[in-house]
Amino acid sequence: MFKGIRLLVLFLLISIFSFSQNNENTANDSITSIANSSNSTSTTSTQPEESQKKEFIFKPTLGLGTGMLSFYGDIYENHFQIPMVSRIGYELSLGQQLTDYLQLNFYALFGKLGANERLTANNRNLNFQSQINAGGAQLLYNFGNFLPKKRTASPYISLGIESFEFLSKTDAYDQYGNKYYYWADGSTRNIAENSANASDAIIIHRDYKYESDVREMNLDGFGKYPERSFAIPIGVGAIFNINDFLTFKLGATMHFTFTDYIDGVTSKSTGNRTGNSKNDNFMMTSFSLNYNFGTKKNDPKYNHEEEYEGVDFLALENGDEDNDGVLDLKDSCLGTPSGVPVDTKGCPLDDDMDGVPNYKDNELTTPVGAFVDEKGVQLSDSLLAYQYEFYMDSTGKFAKVEIHDHTGGSKGSKSIMNQKEYTVLIGTFNKGLPPELMTKFLSISDITSSNVNDSTTIYTAGKFNNLLEAENRKKQLVGDGLAHAKVVYKQNGIYFDAPVLGTTTNSTSLSNTNTTNTTSVVGNNTTAKDPKISKNTTSFVPDNTDMVLNTPGMVLRIQLGAYKKRMSKSVYKNVPDVIEIKTDDGLYKYLSGSFTNFDAAAKHKVDLVLKGYEGAFIAAYKDGKRISLKDAGATSKKEEQTDLTDTSSTNGANKNLIVFKVQVGVFKSDPPDAKMSIFAKIDGISGETTQTGLKRYIVGSFKDYKSAEEYKNDIIKKYALNDAFVVAYYNNEFISLQEAFELMK
């Protein structure tokens, strides 16, 4: 790098020396000319203009620019910081052209630098943001001694020196004062993952407010190091001429600094904070506008008096090109056809004020405010609706639809392109269901649930391929007591209002989308300004607990468990048609299947037990109430008799399928050679790919957490893998420790 800097400095010095030699030669030519003229018989002869020495004229150029500041240091050191994750910087410059190819610039630069790390090779999670204020001078070389004089663009290189100061801060705490702890599953929590009370940890989110002074925190014992330094800016780019006054400059300047403290991390930092021995650098990628104050206004180039010689300005002032009696200077409608009556502004008369002048209007008595066509004829409501629908065509009413069968004409095949899945919305909740309402909902045989976000659950009934079937199901539910049931359709994972049969109303979104005019399922079906489901969402069905459901028949389901914490999809990955119900006392209930006879439910239960859910049991519901298995048709005395209140926690998981292992590292790509040499010494280590594409390395297999914790401590002590910690699996699927502890209860 420094070799390149030396070559660039040498190149600029040679250019400056060439400039000095040219001036010296010019001076020598002038002296020779003067000597010759003194020997001439004519004492009044003048020197040729090209032999006179050029005087220096101060012609400043003021520039104002903005761009992106990218950081290159110990944090985020292995990546090119693209502008999308860079910070904005601003630059103010004052320049003076020394020659046709050299310019001296004085400038001030200020902005913010920053970088963030997450799950790096050394498992550190660092971030910082620094306010940069810099000032300096630079020489800019634009190759003017090689390029044509008249050109629209000039490449350039620059070299300078500057002084700058930095004030670096880090985001270590959220808005409530909670310290960030980064877990291996990608979440950020308020308690360390290897802490004894990690099960009490809650997920928090970074507020990206950099509140902690890096130097004051003194994490590495550097003390009060100076927060100012020098730098060598080296730049490249191009200058584009807009006119003789304005230029546009586009370029990038790398600032090679003499400090390694901008991000607060150096090669002398401790633990996994250790950085490299290189200084921190930053780059400004910018564009700027520059105005040249030195251009003379009396330059013959800008004297256009000759162009107006012989022009009759009085004739122009009194001109009336369209001969409508209104002078052109006062005419608002130039080019009026000859003989058309006009008003005082020179515009054709429009008696009915419909926007169509009288000479083009086929209906001169249109009511005020009426919509008209291009001939001034009033449009009817039906014609307006037709034109709007034809223009928008949001329903496909005017579109030509072609259906092609690419299945070879096989029996039962059908095109599913653009096919919508209709369902009936019966409720939206951001709080848990009370027991009475929960049993009523579970009495609906085809009920399903889906989570919009962490706090909102949508309950629907049925899945239909056409609107008519969905409308029929809605009528049944309305007759059963759900007066506010409505038909919606799901497309690409998003719920939309379905059009009413016989109409062409536009669909509106019921889910988290960016579709305009969206309608959230909130309160009493009101329209929300934000298309996202509101945090203040209340029940879509009023008077929930007193609602009477007259659903005929009986529904049997298999309950897999009821827990105080929400289970991830990994726990029930191999279970079909899982329904999650959140109760108002904080329990999360998980059920599978919907059966009308006991034998079918018992068979499904056996299948789930074989898959590892040995504590699963049958729950029966009828007419909105929980009933006993005997009333549901159970004939065996061995069938379980569970609590009919549905308010207690249960666990259907097979605890023998819970395994604890020790994670020794997680990486975006292959581990560093130093890590691989350590891993080679550990027996039984294996690697796997996480859902986010990371590579996780684990070792050991234990049935209890205590044994895994002891093994982890041995690994740390023996191999110095300080970032090792215990992880959990259920039925060979990765789960959180909190889920494992919940399943072991």
Image: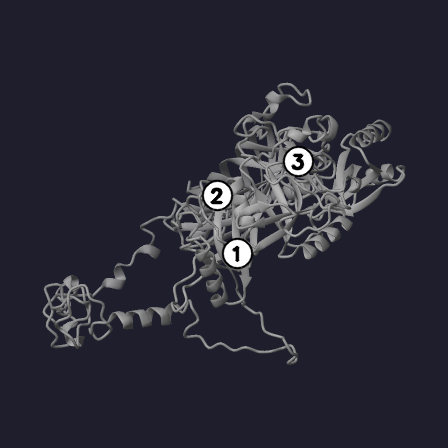
In the shown orientation, is residue 205 left or right of residue 309? right
Q: Secondary structure at mark 2?
A: strand
Q: Nearer the viewer, residue 221 or 587?
A: 587
Query: Which amino acid type is shown beneath numbered disc 2?
Result: Thr
Nearer-N-terminus badge (2/1): 2
Q: Amino acid at mark 1?
A: Pro
What's the mark number on residue 4?
Answer: none
Quadrant hosting residue 188: top right
Instruction: From the viewer's side, name the closer residue of 225 and 177.
Output: 177
Q: Is residue 425 above or below residue 185?
A: below
* Image quadrant in which you'd find residue 739: top right
**Mark before the other along the chain sequence, 3 or 1:** 3
Per the image, the residue denoted by label 3 is 75
Marks 3 and 1 in Cβ contact (< 8 Å):
no
Q: Residue at x 74, y 27 (%)?
A: 271
Residue 380 pos. (x, y %): 24, 71
- Residue 446 placement (x, y as % from top left): 56, 56
Could you say whether the residue bearing mark 3 is in a helix, strand or loop?
A: loop
- Report the residue marked by disc 1: 552
Q: CA distance from mark 3 to mark 1?
A: 65 Å
Indicate whether 373 appears above or below 222: below
Which image quarter is the C terminus in? top right
Whole-angstrom CA distance, mark 2 to mark 1, is 70 Å
Q: Gap between marks 2 and 3, in whole Å?
A: 24 Å
User: Which amino acid lies under the numbered mark 3 shown in the image of this protein?
Assistant: Ile
Question: Pointer 2: what residue?
Answer: 66
